Structure formats: C-alpha cells, structure tokens
Amino acid sequence: MAPEATSRSLLTVLDAEHPEWRPLLVVIKEALREAERPQWARLVPALEHPGRGGRPLLDGAVITVGPRLVGRWVRRILGIAAAAGTEVKPLARAVAAGWLDPLALFESAVSQNVDRFHELSHADTDYRGPLRGLASLIAMPMLQNCRRAWAERVPTGWAYGYCPICGGWPALAEMRGLDGTRHLRCGCCGSDWRTEWLRCPFCSEGEHEKLGSLVSPDSLARQTIEVCNRCSGYVKTMTTLSAIRPEHVVLEDLATLVLDIAALERGYRRPAAKGHEAAVSVVAESSRLHDLLGL
Ligand SMILES: [Zn+2]
Ligand SMILES: [Zn+2]
C-alpha cells in the first residue's frame, strides 16, 4: 500500500483498533477537517522576521481574525470534546456562557502557552496534561495553514531541535527514503525539518556514548525510540519511504503510543516545556480597524 493511502486510512484503522481512543479521535478528526476550510488560509499573517538565530517564524506574529470564525471554532471544538467525555466541560461551559473570551483562549492555544491557557480556564485542579492536547487541537487549523504558507520560508539548514514554524518539540522523527535521511516532524503544524543522525533534538547532545535506541521487538525495526542519556529525552523514529503527510503526523504520533509507554517505562520523557517561545497576538478584525483609524 502506498504511504499516502496508509496515512489516509489511519484514522479508520485507529478507530477500529482502539475504540477507547474514539473520543480523542473525534476531536482530532474535527481539527483536521477544520484546517481544510479556506477561511483559515486567509488568516495567515505576514511574516514578521526571517527566522534567523533560531527564532520560529510564528514568534511575534499578529493574527487578525474575524471573531465569529474563531468563536464558532472554539465553541464547536470544546462542545465536541466535552460531549466526547474529555475533561473540558467547565471550559466549554465558560465559553458557551460568555464568561471566557474565545479569542483569548485561541491566542494562548496558538502560542501554545499552556500556563496561560490553564489560567484562563479557571480550572480548580491542575489539568495541564489534557489542556496541552486540547490547546494544540484548537490551534491546529491556524498552525497547519501557517506551515502551508511558510514552509518554503524556513531558513535552509535549520539546525534546531524545535519546529521552525511554531517552536514546538518534534512529535516524531522519520528515517526517510533509501538514503535514510533523518527528519523531525511537528505534530501541531505538520512541519518537516532535516536533522543530523546523532543529535538529541532537546539538548543538542551529539556524543554517541550518550545517545542510544530502544528497538521494539515486534516492529521489524521499522520503529525505534531514540533516547538521550544526558537529558532523558526520547524521540520515536519511523522508517518511511516518503514523508508522512503533514496533517497526519498527529495521527502517527497517536498510533505509536505504545512506543511512548515503552520509553516512559524506561525513565525517558518528552520535555514538558515548549521548544522555543512563539508568542502570538490575536487581534479582532474590528478593533484592528479601530487602531488603524486611530479611534
Ligand atoms: Zn510546528
Ligand atoms: Zn538530550
């Protein structure tokens, strides 16, 4: 089967094999479908800088949005997530009742600022874990469209472990093609950047004594877990013939959850903090007009 066909059917396979993931899959599916709506492509802002010195392209962006589009999207995804039984009911209620501004929530989600997102949600308990996943799904339509518009503008030879578009850590790595070049992939925006074979994306360790890999016995070495004994980080690595479709990196990440469990059981983890800050300002169309007119 062609890799693209495999990716296309991945949602169906995941749905059939893991009914327990269905609530999450429903939300992911909705975020991917939303990313295809042409309205989002029109919201991609002009680049503020060329991405030199390791600054992700999204950092400093000012996104002017139609409050109705964003409000509708935030309410819908929260409603679906709440109905699917995830832990977002208080957040969904607060937005539906008008206590919480969907634009503020959207801004913290696109900036992937989980602390701010958590603060806005007025959660009684610390539930940054589920919120992190939700924030990236709320941001997904915007970030996937930024990646589509900016992929050619990423500085050549981007040598950092985090995403050149949105600053997130890679969801996985690919050992791609017959020559086995190594590419890091972002789950949130789908971005793709080449990296050296022996280099930890999180702490840049390049000494092979400090780097290793855990091979899953039943995967015929198609999937491995690259680990770093300096920072205890890990990256799941898939052998692929051609690139995983950008929109499906999030699904491949989910489909290989068993590797995450294996890595966690051995004391490795993905860093909790974001790779690099990418602060975004979200401005409502009408207030932007007011600013421009000096009102
Ligand atoms: Zn990204
Ligand atoms: Zn490391």
Image: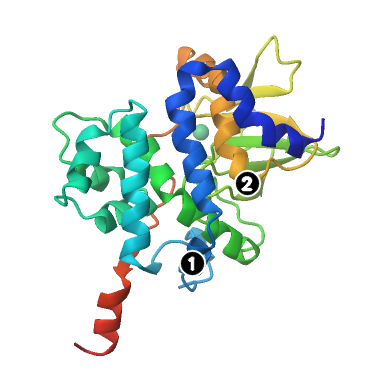
Residue 99 shows in the view: yes
Q: Amino acid at mark 1?
A: Val
Q: Circle 2 sits on which residue? A: 246
Asked whether 141 or 210 is in front, the reply is 141
Dot 1: within a 10 Å radius of its alpha carbon, few (fewer than 14), some, or many (20 or more) residues? many
Q: Circle 1 sits on which residue? A: 44
Mark 2, secondary structure of its residue:
helix
- For the point 51% across and 17% down, the residue is 19
Mark 2 and mark 1 lie on one chain; the one further toward the N terminus is 1
Q: Can you give x and y, in whole percent of width and height, for residue 224 in the image?
A: 66, 22
Q: Can you give x and y, in whole percent of width and height, for residue 216 in the image?
A: 65, 14
Q: CA distance from mark 2 to mark 1?
A: 17 Å
Occupied quadrant, residue 60: bottom left
Q: Amino acid at mark 2?
A: Pro
Mark 1 vs ligand 1: CB below 8 Å: no
Looking at the image, is 281 positioned above or below residue 262? below
Asked whether 164 or 251 is in front, the reply is 251
The C terminus appears in which quarter of the rendering? bottom left
Occupied quadrant, residue 136: top left
Is 34 displayed left or right of 207 in the figure?
left
Mark 1, secondary structure of its residue:
loop
The N terminus appears in which quarter of the rendering? top right
**Circle number at residue 87:** none
